[in-house]
Image: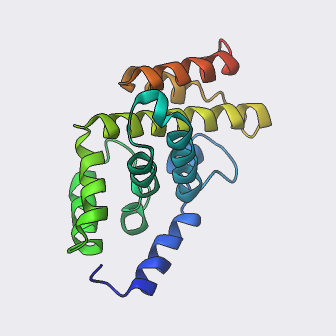
């Protein structure tokens, strides 16, 4: 890392306070943070990596950093006009010389490896699990079906689809 390590860690710690944008837009009060989501994704990777025949250590590492750039960009929704450019600038600013983390982030972004596809599926399943949690806690007035409906067609692995089916069954027929 070319940056002062303590400053980097303080910047990354900002993810603990960065609320996930989609939940707020859907009326969820006090939504999870980006750090909460990354931890949940990492846990799903740890629990399901062997079923997907991927390296658990690499999958967990990728999950832990998959939203790290949001410490610089904020939580940008998919389809944000300049999202890729802002993420590229954040990647270059945060990791100009750190090939390890930079490599994980680039692998995740391209989604060309089996591990990246698996982690992306766990990311989507974590979002669906969070929708289920909010539904069961009755933390918003509107149904969160859209999160399950948009996730399902984006799943790419048998492990991801199986976990999604289990979450959806518990969620009920609303989705």
Q: In what quadrant of the picture does the C terminus appear?
A: top right
Does the image show residue 1?
A: yes
Q: In what quadrant of the picture does the N terminus appear?
A: bottom left
The residue most toward the top is: 173
Tell me residue 145's x, y (percent).
58, 24
Tell me residue 18's x, y (percent).
54, 62
Query: Which residue appears at 41% of the width and 58% of the height?
Result: 65
Residue 132 quadrant: top right
Q: Is residue 18 left or right of residue 133?
A: left
Does the image show residue 82?
A: no
Q: Is residue 26 left or right of residue 108?
A: right
Viewer-proximal residue among 85 and 161:
161
91 is higher (above) or lower (below) than 109: below
Query: Which residue appears at 31% of the width and 41% of the height?
Result: 79
Residue 155 quadrant: top left
Query: Which residue appears at 55% of the width and 59% of the height?
Result: 35
Query: Which residue appears at 70% of the width and 49% of the height?
Result: 29
Viewer-proximal residue among 145 and 126:
126
The residue most toward the right is: 137
Q: Is residue 30 left or right of residue 95?
A: right
144 is higher (above) or lower (below) than 173: below
């Amino acid at each position: 890392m070319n940056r002062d390590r303590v400053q980097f860690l303080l910047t990354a710690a900002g993810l603990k306070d960065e609320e996930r944008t989609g939940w707020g837009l859907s009326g969820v009060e006090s939504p999870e943070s980006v750090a909460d989501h990354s931890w949940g994704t990492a846990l799903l990777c740890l629990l399901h990596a062997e079923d997907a025949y991927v390296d658990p250590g690499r999958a967990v590492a990728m999950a832990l950093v998959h939203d790290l750039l949001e410490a610089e960009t904020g939580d940008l929704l998919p389809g944000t006009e300049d999202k890729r450019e802002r993420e590229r600038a954040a990647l270059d600013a945060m990791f100009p010389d750190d090939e390890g983390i930079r490599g994980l982030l680039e692998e995740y972004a391209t989604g060309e490896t089996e591990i990246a596809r698996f982690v992306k599926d766990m990311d989507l399943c974590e979002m669906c699990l969070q929708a289920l949690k909010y539904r069961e806690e009755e933390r918003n007035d509107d149904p969160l079906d859209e999160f399950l409906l948009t996730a399902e067609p984006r799943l790419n692995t048998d492990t991801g689809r199986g976990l999604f089916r289990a979450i959806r069954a518990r969620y009920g027929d609303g989705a």
